[in-house]
Each structure stands twice: as C-alpha cells, then as structure tokens.
Amino acid sequence: MQQKMQDKHLFEYAIIRVVPRVEREEFVNVGVIMFCAKKKFLKCRFHLNEKKLEVMCNGLDVNELTENLNAMQMICAGGKNSGTIGQLDLASKFRWLTATRSTVVQSSKVHPGFCKDPEEMLERLTEQFVL
C-alpha cells in the first residue's frame, strides 16, 4: 500500500467560474486550475459554452471573458509576458489565482487530491466539472 501512495503526488485544484451577477450567486463552471508542487505543475484549462453563457449571462462580453481566462493561463505559464504575478513562484501564483474575489471570474474553494500524472488529472477534472 505504501508503494502505491509513493507513486501519487498531492495536488490542489479549484474550479474557475463565471459569476455574471455576484449578488445572485449563480455561476457557470468554465475551467479548472491545478497545482502540484512536487511535479512543478501549474496549469489552467478552460472551455466556454457560449450558448449556456448567453442564456445565463445575457450581455456578457465573451471576448473580455476570454482575455481574462487567457491571462490566467499566461500567469500559470510564467515568463516575461505574464506580468508581475506571473513572476512569482508556482505556489504563490496558485494562491493569487484562487483567492476570493467579487468579480465575474471567480474560483471555487481549493480542493486536494492525489494523482500519478497531473496533466491527465487536469483533463479528467475539466471533463468532470466543465464539459
């Protein structure tokens, strides 16, 4: 049993949500952000169901939303075009991206888990919670 646990890595994830009217607390899941320290992994993946967003979020600027989500991906990737937050260490970037905020793009609470392959787990979480 111990050998099987050693093959797995602790990860944390949060669901990225679009909350068109914060006061109503309604949301649409649009992505997942995942962090695995041991594997030096931080990525977010998103998918916009424009029909669903249009029904629930009439008047939402999908282009602006896409820009915000692309910025999250750039922060995760780091590099010179990722801004000040993108220059932080992976754990700090994850904490910043998952911090509580009252904007249209929010994240769920952070949840832990174990996985062998972070990329595969991110795909699975995206399928389960977003698609």
Image (spheres, rainbow, N blue to C red):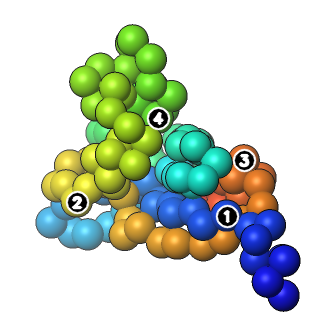
Q: For the residue carrying disc 3, how many other residues have a C-alpha within 10 Å: few (<14), some (14-19), or many (20+)?
A: few
Measured as percent of width and height from the top left, residue 115 is found at 72, 65
C-alpha separation, residue under disc 3 versus residue under disc 4: 14 Å
Report which residue position mark 4 lands on: 76
First of labels 1, 3 by sequence position: 1
C-alpha separation, residue under disc 1 versus residue under disc 3: 12 Å
First of labels 2, 1 by sequence position: 1
First of labels 2, 3 by sequence position: 2
Q: Residue furthest bottom?
A: 1
Query: What kind of residue is marked 3?
Result: Glu
Measured as percent of width and height from the top left, residue 62 is found at 40, 32
Query: What kind of residue is marked 4?
Result: Cys
At numbered mark 2, what does the secondary structure look like: helix, strand or loop? loop
Query: What kind of residue is marked 1?
Result: His
7 w.r.t. 4: above or below: above
Q: For the residue carrying disc 4, how many other residues have a C-alpha within 10 Å: few (<14), some (14-19), or many (20+)?
A: many
Camera-near label (2 vs 3) is 3
The disc at residue 9 is 1
Report which residue position mark 3 lands on: 119
Q: Is residue 128 visible?
A: no
The disc at residue 73 is none
Query: What kind of residue is marked 2?
Result: Thr
Report which residue position mark 2 lands on: 100
C-alpha separation, residue under disc 2 versus residue under disc 4: 18 Å
Camera-near label (4 vs 1) is 1
Camera-near label (2 vs 4) is 4
Question: Residue placed at 26% from the left, 56% from the top?
Answer: 99
First of labels 3, 4 by sequence position: 4
Question: Residue placed at 46% from the left, 35% from the top?
Answer: 76
